[in-house]
Amino acid sequence: MNFRKELEPNIEKSERLFPIVLDLISKFDEAFDAFNVKKMDDIIDQINLLIDKGIDKEDIYEYWGYTSAEDLAFGLTLTLPRHVFPITEEELSEIKNRIQILLEADENMEKSISTFLFKNEVSVASVLIGDYYELIINHYNSSRPDNIIYL
């Protein structure tokens, strides 16, 4: 199937931003431990300038309970495609197929996606599913007119 380039995750951009965002998360952790709210706010601003997502402190300091700093950094650097909607049923089917493949991913597949991220202990397949493909599906489902419930 023809999958639009605009729907592909920009792994190269993520690889460039990953070490910077990971370092900022580490600095955020230090500021959090020191109860330095101003420094935490400054770091959030720096991250937002890099990733263009509009995150806040809660998006960072709650990660300890559910993911690693490496996975968080990769997830934050994944830029969702903004100008590709609506997507077709065929594209949606391909996304679901990719999720299924990623659910069964082994080390070799993760390395083939990004050796750099794999070496940096990122759960590449898991982050791609949760922070990229599922968000596209959720956007697709929420923007479909037939999902409107009239009361």
Image (spheres, rainbow, N blue to C red):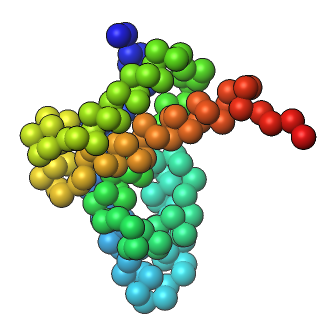
Q: Which of 105 and 85 is in front in this view?
A: 105
Q: Image height check: is 80 above or below 76?
A: above
Q: Image height check: is 140 above or below 61?
A: above
- Residue at 77% x, 33% y: name it: 148
- Residue at 32% x, 71% y: name it: 26
Quadrant assignment for the N terminus: top left
Residue 145 sits in quarter: top right
Residue 121 placement, left or right of 39: left
x then y, percent, for residue 100: 32, 35
x then y, percent, for residue 126: 31, 49
Residue 70 sits in quarter: bottom left
Residue 106 sits in quarter: top left
Residue 139 placement, left or right of 20: right
Q: What is the residue that sits farthest to the left in this orientation?
A: 108
Q: Image height check: is 42 above or below 97?
A: below
- Residue at 57% x, 53% y: name it: 54
In this rendering, the count of numbered labels is: 0
x then y, percent, for residue 12: 27, 35
Q: Nearer the viewer, residue 24 or 81?
A: 81
x then y, percent, for residue 34: 43, 89
Q: Image height check: is 145 above or below 134?
A: above
Q: What is the residue that sits farthest to the bottom in this orientation?
A: 34
Quadrant assignment for the C terminus: top right
Q: Nearer the viewer, residue 135 or 80?
A: 135
**Residue 102 visible somewhere in the drawing:** yes
**Residue 20 visible somewhere in the drawing:** no
Residue 146 placement, left or right of 55: right
Q: What is the residue that sits farthest to the right in this orientation?
A: 151
